[in-house]
Each structure stands twice: as structure tokens, then as C-alpha cells.
Image (cartoon, rainbow, N blue to C red):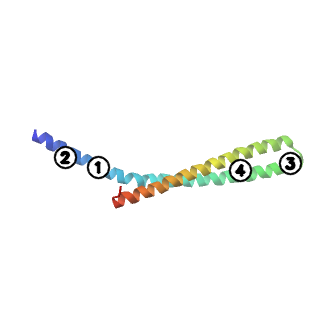
Amino acid sequence: MIRKTVYLAVTAAMLAVSGLSVAQAAPNGDMRGDRRELRQDRHDLRGDRRDMRQDRHALRHDLRTGNRAGARAQRRDLRGDRHDLRADRHDMRGDRRDLRGDRHATHVARNGQR
């Protein structure tokens, strides 16, 4: 009976210690992922802006040459690019918010605050 109690106590202590180390390591790994996502979102933003520049140039060309159908298609494409740009900005805001939250969690974990 005593052996079983000691075994359970030791097992519980080992699980608690391993749980603490995992809890402290989680924010750092998560920050790396958030930074990667932020870099990817910046890359997507640059691509969307490049696409918009090209579409605006094509729209001006279509308007100059009187190609109304082409201009209509370019306007539609620009609308889609604006939507993508807004979505990427929104995603970046969320990633920045996650990154700030992870920094706060890491700071709290290091200082032992709750």
C-alpha cells in the first residue's frame, strides 16, 4: 500500500515538472511561428501591391486605347487585389497581436507572475 502511494506521488511529481517545462517552452516556439507568419504576410502584401501596380497600368492603357471590356476586367481585378490587400493587413494585425501576447506570456512565465 505504501509503495503504491509513493509510486503515485513520484509519478504525479514527474508529470507536474514535465508539464511546467512544456508550458514554459510553448510561448517561445509559438513566437517563432508568429514571426514566420508575419514575414509571409509582408511578402504577400508586396506581391499584392505589385499586382495592383500592374493592373493600374493595364487599366490606364485600356482606357487610353478605348478597350472598355478590358478596362472593366482590370477594375474587377483591382477590386479583388484590394480585397486581398485588406485581408493580408488584417492577418498581419492578428499576427502582431499574437506576437505581443506571446511576449507578455513569456515575460510573465520568466518572472513567475500570474
Which is closer to the viewer, label 4 or label 1? 1
Q: Is label 4 in contact with label 2 (beta carbons under 8 Å)?
A: no
Work out how far the residue at label 2 is from the one at label 1, CA to CA, in angstroms. Answer: 12 Å
Residue 17 in picture, x, y percent from top left = 27, 51
Specify which label sits upstream in the sequence, 4 or 2.
Answer: 2
Task: Read off the residue under disc 3.
Answer: 63
Separation of marks 3 and 1 at Cα, in angstroms: 67 Å
The mark found on residue 10 in the picture is 2
Q: Is residue 103 left or right of residue 50?
A: left
Task: Tell me which label, 4 or 1, sits earlier in the chain.
Answer: 1
Q: Which of the two discs, 3 and 1, labels the residue nearer the N terminus?
A: 1
The kind of residue on which mark 3 rests is Leu
Residue 102, image x and y in percent? Answer: 45, 55
Residue contact at pointers 2 and 1, CB within 8 angstroms: no
Say if 34 sits above or below 7 in the image.
Answer: below
Question: Could you tell me the amino acid type at mark 2?
Answer: Val
Indicate which label's residue lies in the foreground, 4 or 2: 2
Crowdedness of circle 1 by 10 Å Cα count: few (<14), some, many (20+)?
Answer: few
Q: Give x and y (percent) for residue 50.
A: 70, 53
Quadrant in the rendering for residue 71: top right
The residue tagged 4 is 51
Residue at far top of view: 1
Which residue carries the number 1 mark?
A: 18
Quadrant of the rendering where the N terminus is positioned: top left
What amino acid is found at the position of numbered circle 1 in the picture?
Ser
Q: Amino acid at mark 4?
A: Asp
